[in-house]
Image: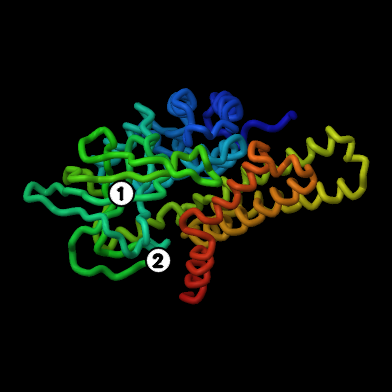
């Protein structure tokens, strides 16, 4: 099938089509629970990882709207990789906003020059979705550094990423809770190559099966003073910072919805069903739903100011509408679309996974309506 392979805007990324072709070639192989090393190398060398990094640090200085477009294109080929790159961009946005001059030079240059991948480790077994009660600790040392201890689960990119933003309790006074996290927590940049860091396994998920989502453990990890990105009152704001820019998981949902829509069209063409008014009406409905998702995602970066509510709304609307599109497309394709390896079944499971990824949709609704009540 002749599908578009690039978003409408591809800022300075002529190699993106090659990455998307490589993604499509292995998207159905989830046996390893992660992208292949060859695919990761293609991401590193194509410039995808440095897209939103300011030019002065070796990046492309792309807008967050362009960044959402590239995430959607990647997710259309492989939602798991779209998620990995989305979370990498989210981490990069925090380094840009909260890093010192030295930290920006150190970490952003490492991405732009060496292709290092970022991930974030917030969640722990038994904690709430807002990350307000965690057990991972950061104990201060006399030299200004910190020792980190604890276990994190649902870390997307575990074993794939090189650098991790880890949320830990700093042992300071009991912190007030924000929309995310507490003020007695800190965010630390953890290098996977150092002693004290370990990946303890990849989870066998029903969706996003190639996202390398798994468990990491920190055992006496020695963080330097320059590895502390945020502490105290800044931390809750830093956790939610990507949303203020309009960066949204709705872009991943858009890619999933686009792919499911096009598969439904191709099924109709292959089975000579496009002459049926009923089938064409179903296709029209899918197209209108897809257009709505695209419009909502594009609107997240359309204005100045805090874009948190549009970004969270796009995440909820996009993921839930993508689920609907996938289910409808499965019904149109027939029983074969529910087999384990059918692309529509994979897409439906990926769409469902987006609704559950942080912040999950129920929390997004609470955060958006709480902001409305504060006006």
In the depicted structure, whether residue 165 falls above or below residue 108: below
Nearer the observer, 293 or 295? 293
In the depicted structure, whether residue 39 falls above or below residue 95: above
| Helix, strand or loop at mark 2 | loop
Q: Answer left or right for 4 relative to 29.
A: right
Q: Which mark is residue 166?
A: 1
Which residue corresponds to mark 2?
A: 179
**By what rule are the colours in the image chosen?**
rainbow
Number of numbered markers: 2
Point out residue 7 in the picture as x, y percentages from the top left corner.
62, 36
Nearer the observer, 309 or 11? 309
Q: Residue at x 64, y 31 (%)?
A: 5
Can residue 89 be seen by looking at this rendering? no
Front tag of 2 and 1: 1
Can residue 101 be seen by looking at this rendering? yes
Q: CA distance from mark 2 to mark 1?
A: 18 Å
Q: Residue at x 77, y 41 (%)?
A: 264
Point out residue 88 in the picture as x, y percentages from the top left corner.
42, 41
Q: Residues within 10 Å of mark 2 (few under 14, many from 20)?
A: some
Q: Residue furthest left?
A: 142
Label located before the other in sequence (2 or 1)? 1
């Amino acid at each position: 099938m002749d599908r578009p392979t690039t978003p409408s805007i591809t800022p300075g990324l002529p190699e993106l089509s090659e990455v998307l072709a490589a993604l499509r070639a292995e998207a159905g192989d989830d046996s390893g629970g992660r992208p292949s090393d060859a695919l990761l190398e293609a991401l590193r060398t194509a410039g995808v990882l440095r897209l939103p990094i300011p030019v002065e640090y070796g990046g492309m200085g792309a807008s967050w709207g362009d960044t959402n477009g590239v995430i959607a294109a990647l997710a259309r080929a492989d939602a798991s990789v779209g998620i990995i790159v989305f979370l990498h961009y989210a981490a990069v946005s925090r380094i840009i906003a909260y890093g010192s001059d030295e930290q920006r030079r150190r970490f952003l240059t490492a991405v732009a020059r060496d292709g290092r991948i970022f991930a974030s480790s917030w969640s722990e077994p038994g904690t709430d979705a807002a990350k307000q009660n965690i057990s991972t600790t950061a104990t201060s040392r006399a030299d200004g550094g910190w020792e980190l201890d604890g276990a994190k689960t649902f870390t997307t990119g575990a074993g794939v990423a090189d650098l991790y933003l880890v949320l830990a309790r700093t042992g300071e006074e009991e912190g007030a809770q924000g929309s995310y996290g507490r003020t007695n927590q800190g965010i630390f940049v953890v290098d996977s190559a150092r002693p004290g860091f370990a990946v303890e396994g990849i989870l066998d998920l029903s969706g996003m099966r190639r996202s390398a989502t798994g468990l990491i453990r920190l055992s006496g990890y020695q963080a330097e003073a320059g590895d502390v990105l945020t502490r105290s009152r800044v931390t809750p704001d830093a956790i939610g910072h990507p949303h203020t820019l309009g960066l949204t998981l709705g872009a991943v949902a858009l890619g999933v919805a686009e792919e499911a829509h096009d598969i439904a069209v191709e099924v109709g063409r292959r089975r000579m069903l496009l002459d049926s008014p009923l089938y064409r009406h179903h296709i029209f409905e899918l197209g209108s739903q897809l257009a709505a998702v695209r419009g909502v995602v594009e609107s997240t970066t359309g204005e100045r100011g805090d874009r948190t509510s549009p970004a969270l709304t796009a995440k909820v609307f996009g993921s839930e509408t993508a689920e609907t599109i996938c289910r409808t497309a499965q019904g149109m394709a027939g029983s074969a679309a529910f087999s384990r390896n059918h692309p529509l079944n994979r897409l439906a499971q990926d769409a469902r996974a987006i609704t559950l990824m942080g912040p999950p949709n129920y929390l997004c609704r609470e955060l958006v309506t709480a902001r409305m009540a504060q006006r």
